[in-house]
Image: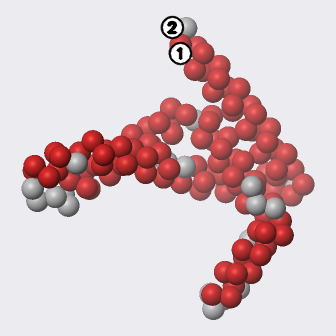
Amino acid sequence: MLSAPSFHYGIAMLNEFLPFDFDIDPITVAGVGLWSLALYLGLSPVSDWVTEQLNRWFNFAERSLYTSTEEFERTRRARESLNQFYASVFSIVPFLFVGVFCNYGVEWGLGRNWSISMGILACIGCGIYELGRRDGEASK
């Protein structure tokens, strides 16, 4: 995890390369990350569906790059594994967008001091829910 000084140092380095200034608040980044994680855990069937759809799309898009069927079949296993990895990484993106709205909703409703606390509570609650959901599926 980035501490505040190293985080600000990274932003200062970006400001040297870019012709414009922008300021990223570490509290907002932490709050959005916590809310995204909570939503990802709490809506795990949706996150699984998003991962599966992204994997299907990556496999379909990559098929159009090959002209030879033999070459496509020879490298299929490695490409499908890599596409599954990319799909699982990119499946967090929709939850990041929703996490932004949840974080700003908490900041607007309860104040800025509560954004990280509510994000932590949401992560704990959704993590416990996910453990119970998986235990319930395993006992069926």
Which label was assigned to residue 137?
1
Nearest to the observer: residue 58 or residue 40: 58
Displayed quadrant of residue 64? bottom left
Q: Are marks 1 and 2 in contact (CB under 8 Å)?
A: yes
As helix, strand or loop, the secondary structure at mark 2 comes to loop
Q: Is residue 63 left or right of residue 123?
A: left
As helix, strand or loop, the secondary structure at mark 1 comes to helix
User: Is residue 104 something that shows in the picture?
Assistant: no
Coordinates of residue 35 in the picture (x, y in percent): 70, 47
Q: What's the residue at 58%, 20% (across, down)?
A: 134
Nearest to the observer: residue 24 or residue 5: 5
Rendered position, 6 above or below 94: below
User: Disc count in the image?
Assistant: 2
User: Is residue 36 something that shows in the picture?
Assistant: yes
Rendered position, 67 above or below 126: below
Quarter of the image where the N terminus is located: bottom right
Rendered position, 114 above or below 39: below
Q: What's the residue at 70%, 54% (across, down)?
A: 32
Coordinates of residue 53 in the picture (x, y in percent): 37, 43
Residue matched to label 2: 140
